[in-house]
Image (cartoon, rainbow, N blue to C red):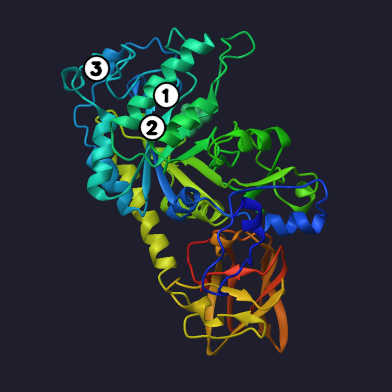
């Protein structure tokens, strides 16, 4: 069956149980009307690797390298690497600390912009093999990879394309070979790699070195050696949200338009999901609304990752020990990232001893406690659910997520009412679409019955993998979720109401 026939194959095979498999990319034909485009957009779905990644919700960055010892954020590649000597390094402490905070995958800065390698690369002398650390026998990429295996969490590598140490940088062919060799080492010697992160930063300026990166070769190499790995930021699977503040967009679509050139490259590639370097999207920009999709030549599933550091800097600086974000600040960031259809990539930089410092460990503990106590009890559990045009209404308040809720026939709107004789007090709404069938909801509101009148509590646009909204506490025994607009039958895997004493 061709890809396009697949797309038009009956879309809900067994309503409420499973979706037909669509794809993470679709073409728009010249004759497609707006309604056809919207229909197609509603059926673009994450690839298995994108879905796994999205469901992680929380991942961690470990920024660690020569900058940790020079107290810098960006090294110039001329550092004296004999300064690199973490005397108490314990990668298991790093991994256990973040795992205890609910983080499901980590990414180590194997090489930052200064070119210093945390593994003994055969292709440069600017690496850990020429430092006092373990008398040059150390390999921190291996230590982190092994700790991830031990604790059962995902492992990823950050390999900076911008390299201020390599003499090849600026000689495009030579540097691309050097970069591919390093990538091959990282993808061959450390077991499973779940994410490869290509930073877009480049501080060369107009008179600096001009290097053209061979992205397509890199992508092909990754697909061949580690097919399950998502390629993030300057890559086809995951895009940068556009800020480093921890704040995602209020309207965040995972389905975006792609242009003709990208579309042709995708079609020409032997693997359908290899594509050229995508554009970087700006923070406030509207990326996937109906207006944006109008002129699209193709549509692609391209979800947002929100990266932010627990400290002001990405690397450890002693002076920032007193500036570590608090548990409450991290809870707000959780709402403005994961709660806005994005994944949160939180940076926790190990210190000069090679340990995550006490202040960061404490902040992560506080955050975890706040999150866990907030989301422990869905207050809607025990409410009856009414939705005349709904299928699987009760699935909405069940904790098992084996099935999803949707609407009958072709209904793209719905009113879902939740009733209980015992009123509850709440100030947080959580919604989750079943993104295995695509992202569809465009507008919703939450209301409660007050003096026989339905009164709005909050409202929003996109939902996607997860949407969290907080508002002033409300006490009610009758609430309803109104789905005002959706690109096709809306789906939900859960609706939750919660109470937090810590949200602003
Ligand atoms: C930026 C880099 O320049 C920072 O140093 C850091 O690595 C951050 C995650 O990405 O682009």
Residue underneath mark 3: 129
Q: In what element is the residue under mark 1?
A: loop
Tell whether circle 2 marks a residue whose Cβ is less than 8 angstroms from ligand 1.
yes
* Quadrant (top left, top right, bottom left, bottom right) of the N terminus: bottom right
Any part of residue 75 in sight: no
Any part of residue 168 in sight: yes
Q: In what element is the residue under mark 2?
A: loop
Which quadrant of the view contains residue 33? Answer: bottom right
Query: Residue 429: which disc?
Result: none
Q: Earlier in the sequence, mark 1 or mark 3?
A: 1
Which quadrant of the view contains residue 483? Answer: bottom right
Q: Earlier in the sequence, mark 2 or mark 3?
A: 2
State the residue at coordinates (70%, 74%): 456
Front in this rendered view, residue 390 or 207: 390
Front in this rendered view, residue 445 or 145: 145
- Single out the mark in the foreground, 2 or 1: 1
Q: Is residue 501 above or below residue 131?
A: below
State the residue at coordinates (48%, 17%): 176
Q: Are marks 2 and 1 in contact (CB under 8 Å)?
A: yes
Circle 2 Cα neighbour tier, 10 Å, few/some/many (<14 / 14–19 / ≥20): many
Tell whether circle 1 marks a residue whose Cβ is less than 8 angstroms from ligand 1.
yes
Among all residues in the image, which is located at the extreme left?
135
Instruction: Locate residue 190, reporting x and y percent.
Output: 28, 34
Residue underneath mark 1: 112
Among all residues in the image, which is located at the extreme bottom?
421
Separation (CA) of disc 1 from disc 3 = 16 Å
Residue underneath mark 2: 63
Separation (CA) of disc 2 from disc 1 = 8 Å
- Single out the mark in the foreground, 2 or 3: 3
Which quadrant of the view contains residue 207? Answer: top right
Circle 3 Cα neighbour tier, 10 Å, few/some/many (<14 / 14–19 / ≥20): many
């Amino acid at each position: 069956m061709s890809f396009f026939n697949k797309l038009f194959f009956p879309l809900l095979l067994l309503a409420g149980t499973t979706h037909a498999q669509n794809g993470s990319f679709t073409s728009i034909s010249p004759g497609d009307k707006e309604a056809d485009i919207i229909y197609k957009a509603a059926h673009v779905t994450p690839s298995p690797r994108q879905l796994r990644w999205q469901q992680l919700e929380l991942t961690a960055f470990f920024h660690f390298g020569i900058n940790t010892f020079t107290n810098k954020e960006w090294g110039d590649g001329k550092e004296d690497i004999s300064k690199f000597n973490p005397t108490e390094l314990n990668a298991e402490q790093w991994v256990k600390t973040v795992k205890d905070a609910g983080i499901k995958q980590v990414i180590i800065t194997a090489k930052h912009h200064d070119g210093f390698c945390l593994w003994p690369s055969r292709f440069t002398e600017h690496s850990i093999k020429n430092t006092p650390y373990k008398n040059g026998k150390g390999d921190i990429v291996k230590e982190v990879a092994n700790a991830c295996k031990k604790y059962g969490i995902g492992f990823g590598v950050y390999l900076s394309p911008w390299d201020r140490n390599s003499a090849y940088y600026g000689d495009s062919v030579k540097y691309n070979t050097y970069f591919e060799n390093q990538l091959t080492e990282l993808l061959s010697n450390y077991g499973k790699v779940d994410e490869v992160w290509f930073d877009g930063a480049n501080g060369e300026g107009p008179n600096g070195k001009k290097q053209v990166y061979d992205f397509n070769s890199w992508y092909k190499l990754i697909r061949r050696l580690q097919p399950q790995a998502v390629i993030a930021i300057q890559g086809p699977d995951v895009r940068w949200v556009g800020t480093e503040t921890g704040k995602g967009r209020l309207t965040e679509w995972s389905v975006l338009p792609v242009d003709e050139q990208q579309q042709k490259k995708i079609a020409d590639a032997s693997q359908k999901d290899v594509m050229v370097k995508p554009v970087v999207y700006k923070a406030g920009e509207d990326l996937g609304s109906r207006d944006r999709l109008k002129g699209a030549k193709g549509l692609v599933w391209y979800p947002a990752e929100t990266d932010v550091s627990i400290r002001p800097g990405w690397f450890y600086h002693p002076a920032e020990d007193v500036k570590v974000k608090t548990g409450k600040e991290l809870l707000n960031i959780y709402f403005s990232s994961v709660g806005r259809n994005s994944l949160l990539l939180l940076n926790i930089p190990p210190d000069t001893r090679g340990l995550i410092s006490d202040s960061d460990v404490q902040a992560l503990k506080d955050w975890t406690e706040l999150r866990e106590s907030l989301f422990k009890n869905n207050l809607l559990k025990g409410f009856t659910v009414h939705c005349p045009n709904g299928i699987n209404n009760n699935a909405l308040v069940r904790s098992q997520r084996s099935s999803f809720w949707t609407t009958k026939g072709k209904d793209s709107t719905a009113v879902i009412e939740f009733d209980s004789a015992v009123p509850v007090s709440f100030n947080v709404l959580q919604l989750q679409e079943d993104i295995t069938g695509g992202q569809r909801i465009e507008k919703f509101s939450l209301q409660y019955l007050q003096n026989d009148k339905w009164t709005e509590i909050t409202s929003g646009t996109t939902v996607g993998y997860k949407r969290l909204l907080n508002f002033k506490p409300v006490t009610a025994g009758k609430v309803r979720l109104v789905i005002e607009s959706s690109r096709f039958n809306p789906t939900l895997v859960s609706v939750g109401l919660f109470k937090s004493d810590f949200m602003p």
